[in-house]
Amino acid sequence: MALLEKMNITKSISPVKLASSFKSFLLKWKWLLKKFCHSNDEEQSIILAVEAAAIGGNGLGEALSTEPSFRFILQTLHDEEIVTEDAIIAWANKRRDENATTPKGKLFNQRPTQDFLKWLEENSESEEESDEDDTSDDEE
């Protein structure tokens, strides 16, 4: 959360500019986030912090909750290997029953976020199938 606040994000920033700025910002701070992430729980804590910032109001919250900003941040955290697919999917599984009218529910149910989660889950399933095929080939 402190790192996001350090970026001085305003509500007028476009989602693309936000994602680009976030990625550049991670070049400097990625090492720190990785040091704190020793388990799925810590990775989910990062997602929860971004979610809290997005629903927290002010300029930062408005920028993060504007579609597709939240999805871009999740995807960047995944692409930069700060949070794993498993952590994002675990977070999503906790949010699936969230009332769609709550701030968390609205953020979670944004179409770009749902598209990213669908892609992650399909990618995860295809990797599992590929691993199973590799295991069965080894057994033959």
Image (cartoon, grey):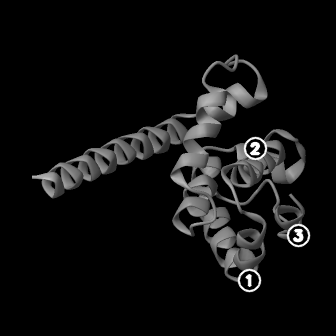
Q: Is residue 109 visible?
A: no
Q: Taking 45 as reference, is 93 above or below it?
A: above
Tell me where residue 90 appears, x and y as whole percent: 60, 38
Q: Is residue 72 visible?
A: yes
- Residue 51 is labelled as 2
Instruction: State which quarter of the image contains the N terminus.
Output: bottom right
Q: Amino acid at mark 1?
A: Lys
Q: Is residue 117 left or right of residue 104?
A: left
Q: Is residue 117 left or right of residue 63?
A: left
Q: Is residue 74 left or right of residue 38?
A: left
Q: Which residue is mark 3?
A: 6
The residue shown at (72%, 79%) is: 31
The residue shown at (68%, 28%) is: 106
Q: Could you tell which of marks 1 and 3 lies nearer the N-terminus?
A: 3
- Residue 28 is labelled as 1
Q: Could you tell which of marks 2 and 3 lies nearer the N-terminus?
A: 3
